[in-house]
Amino acid sequence: MTIKQLIEILQQVEDQDTRVMVSGYEGGYNDVMNINPIPLDIALDVSNEWYYGKHERAEMLIYEDRKDYQIVKAIIL
C-alpha cells in the first residue's frame, strides 16, 4: 500500500475521531503508538516464515545480499 492509497481509504472514514489500531501479536488489537514519518529502506519479500514479517529493513541484510531484493522506501506504522 502506498501513502496515496492509505489517504484515499482514510478519507472515506466519516468520523475523524476514529481510532487507528494494528493487529496484536497473537490476537486482539493495539493502538498505533508511534509513527515515524521518515521513510526507511525496506527489502521486499525477504522471509517466507509465517511467524515473521515478509519484509526487512535493508540495513539488516548483509550488504552483498541487498542486490538480491527489491529495495523500496516505506514508513512504519
Image (cartoon, helix red, strand yellow):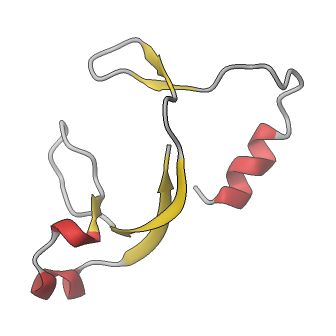
Residue displayed at 29% across by 63% down? 57
Location of residue 5 with respect to 29 vertically, above or below: below
Q: Looking at the rendering, which quadrant does residue 25 occupy?
A: top left
Return the residue found at the far top.
28
Above or below for 60 versus 29: below
The location of residue 20, given as percent across then percent down, is 62, 26
**How far from the left and from the top, in percent, is residue 67?**
22, 88
Q: Is residue 36 above or below residue 39?
A: above
Q: Residue furthest right?
A: 14
Q: Residue at x 28, y 53 (%)?
A: 54
Q: Quadrant of residue 47?
A: bottom left
Could you tell whether 52 is left or right of 29 in the image? Answer: left
> In front: 37, or 22?
37
Q: Is residue 5 above or below residue 68?
A: above
Residue 71 in which image quadrant: bottom left
Quarter of the N terminus within the rendering: bottom right
Q: How many marks?
A: 0
Q: Nearer the viewer, residue 45 or 35?
A: 35
Give the image location of residue 31, x and y in percent: 51, 21
Which one is in front, 49 or 71? 71
Of 8 and 16, the residue lying toward us: 16
Residue at 62%, 60% (x, y): give it: 2
- The spot of residue 45 in percent (x, y) is 28, 63
Q: Residue at x 27, y 18 (%)?
A: 26
